[in-house]
C-alpha cells in the first residue's frame, strides 16, 4: 500500500469565504464531501438509523437475499446486513480519525522539532522515522497487532505508527522551507522563544498542507483497517466491521454474494469519498492552483 502523495507547503493559502466558493465549483470535491458527511452522520446516529440490532441472530433467515424484512439481506447467522453496515461505519470512521489524528499529532511535533532545531535532534528524529519506513506498511501493522493483540485500540495504534513517519517528513520539509524566511528571522531577532516561533509563525503557514495530507490518509487508514480486520487482526466479533463482514461472507460468494459484496461497496465508497475530498482540498488550499 503506497502512502498518499506529499503536498507541498506554501506560506500563503486561500482563506475565508473564497475557500468555500472555490470548493463549491469542484464537482468531484462536493461529491466527496457528501459521501464523507453521510458517513459521519451514519456513524453518529447509528442507533437511530439501524432498523435492527446488529448482533441479533435469526437462523431461519440465514443468507436471506434482500427483501421487505431485510432490506440488504441477512448474513450467515441471519443478522441484518443493513444494521451491521450502519454500525460498521462507526468502526471505520473512528479508526480513520483516531489513527490519522494520532499520527498527525506525533509526526507533526517530531517533524517540527527536527526541522526547526536541526542538528542531532533532526538526525535522531529522521533516522527513527526511516526505521519505521523500512518495513512494508501492512507488514508493520501486522507485527504491531500480532504483538499487542487484536482489537480496536491496537488497530488504531498500529495505523498511527504507520502514518507518523509520513507526517513527520511532510512537516519537516515545510519547516525547512520556511525557517529561513524573513518573517522567521525577524521573530528571532525580536527575541521570540522557539516554542512561539514554531507555534505561531511556522505552523500556521503549512497547516493547510497537513489538513490535505490528513484527509488523503483517511482513505488509506480505512483500507489498512479493512486489511487487518479481514485477516482477523482488527476489530473482533461481535462488533460489526465492514472488512469482517467481507471475511465472513467470502465462503458464500456464489450462493449469497450480497453478504460480501455490500460491505465491499461501502468500503470503496468511503475510500472514494475521502480521496475526492482530499484532492479538492489540495486544489483549493494550494495557492498555485489559483494561478492556473
Image (cartoon, grey):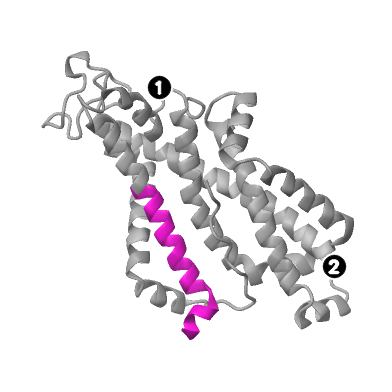
Query: Callout 2: helix, strand or loop?
Result: loop
Observer-nearest of 96 and 166 = 166
**Residue labelled with disc 2:** 193
Query: Magenta segment, which residues?
Result: 269-292
Question: x, y (%) of residue 31?
Answer: 32, 61
| Left or right relative to 11: residue 243 | left
Q: Is residue 175 magenta?
A: no
Viewer-nearest of discs 1 and 2:
1
Measure how far apart labels 1 and 2 are at the Cα level. Answer: 52 Å
Query: Callout 1: helix, strand or loop?
Result: loop
Q: Is residue 30 above or below residue 139?
A: below
Residue at x 80%, y 64% (from the top left corner): 116
Q: Which mark is residue 217?
A: none
Question: x, y (%) of residue 22?
Answer: 41, 77
| Left or right relative to 270: residue 99 | right
Q: Is residue 284 magenta?
A: yes
Q: Residues within 10 Å of mark 1 (few under 14, many from 20)?
A: few
Residue positioned most to the top: 59
Q: Is residue 50 visible?
A: no
Observer-nearest of 204 and 149 = 149
Q: Earlier in the sequence, mark 1 or mark 2?
A: 2
**Residue labelled with disc 1:** 238
Amino acid at each position: 500500500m503506497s502512502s498518499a502523495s506529499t503536498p507541498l507547503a506554501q506560506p500563503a493559502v486561500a482563506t475565508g469565504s473564497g475557500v468555500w466558493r472555490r470548493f463549491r465549483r469542484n464537482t468531484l470535491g462536493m461529491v466527496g464531501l457528501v459521501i464523507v458527511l453521510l458517513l459521519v452522520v451514519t456513524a453518529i446516529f447509528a442507533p437511530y438509523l439501524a432498523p435492527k440490532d446488529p448482533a441479533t441472530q435469526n437462523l431461519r433467515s440465514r443468507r436471506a437475499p434482500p427483501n421487505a424484512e431485510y432490506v440488504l439481506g441477512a448474513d450467515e447467522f441471519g443478522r441484518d446486513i443493513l444494521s451491521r453496515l450502519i454500525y460498521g461505519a462507526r468502526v471505520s470512521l473512528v479508526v480513520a480519525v483516531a489513527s490519522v489524528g494520532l499520527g498527525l499529532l506525533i509526526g507533526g511535533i517530531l517533524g517540527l522539532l527536527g526541522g526547526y532545531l536541526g542538528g542531532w535532534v533532526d538526525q535522531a528524529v529522521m533516522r527513527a522515522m526511516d526505521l519505521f519506513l523500512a518495513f512494508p506498511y501492512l507488514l508493520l501493522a501486522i507485527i504491531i497487532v500480532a504483538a499487542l493483540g487484536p482489537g480496536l485500540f491496537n488497530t488504531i495504534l498500529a495505523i498511527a505508527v504507520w502514518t507518523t513517519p509520513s507526517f513527520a517528513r511532510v512537516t519537516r520539509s515545510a519547516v525547512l522551507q520556511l525557517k529561513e524566511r524573513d518573517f522567521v528571522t525577524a521573530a528571532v531577532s525580536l527575541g521570540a522563544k522557539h516554542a512561539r516561533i514554531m507555534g505561531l509563525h511556522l505552523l500556521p503557514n503549512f497547516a493547510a498542507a497537513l489538513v490535505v495530507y490528513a484527509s488523503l490518509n483517511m482513505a488509506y487508514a480505512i483500507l489498512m483497517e479493512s486489511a487487518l480486520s479481514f485477516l482477523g487482526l482488527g476489530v473482533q466479533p461481535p462488533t460489526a466491521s465492514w472488512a469482517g463482514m467481507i471475511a465472513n461472507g467470502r465462503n458464500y460468494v456464489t450462493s449469497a454474494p450480497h453478504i460480501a459484496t455490500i460491505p465491499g461497496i461501502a468500503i470503496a465508497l468511503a475510500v472514494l469519498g475521502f480521496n475526492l475530498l482530499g484532492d479538492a482540498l489540495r486544489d483549493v488550499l494550494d495557492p498555485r492552483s489559483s494561478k492556473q
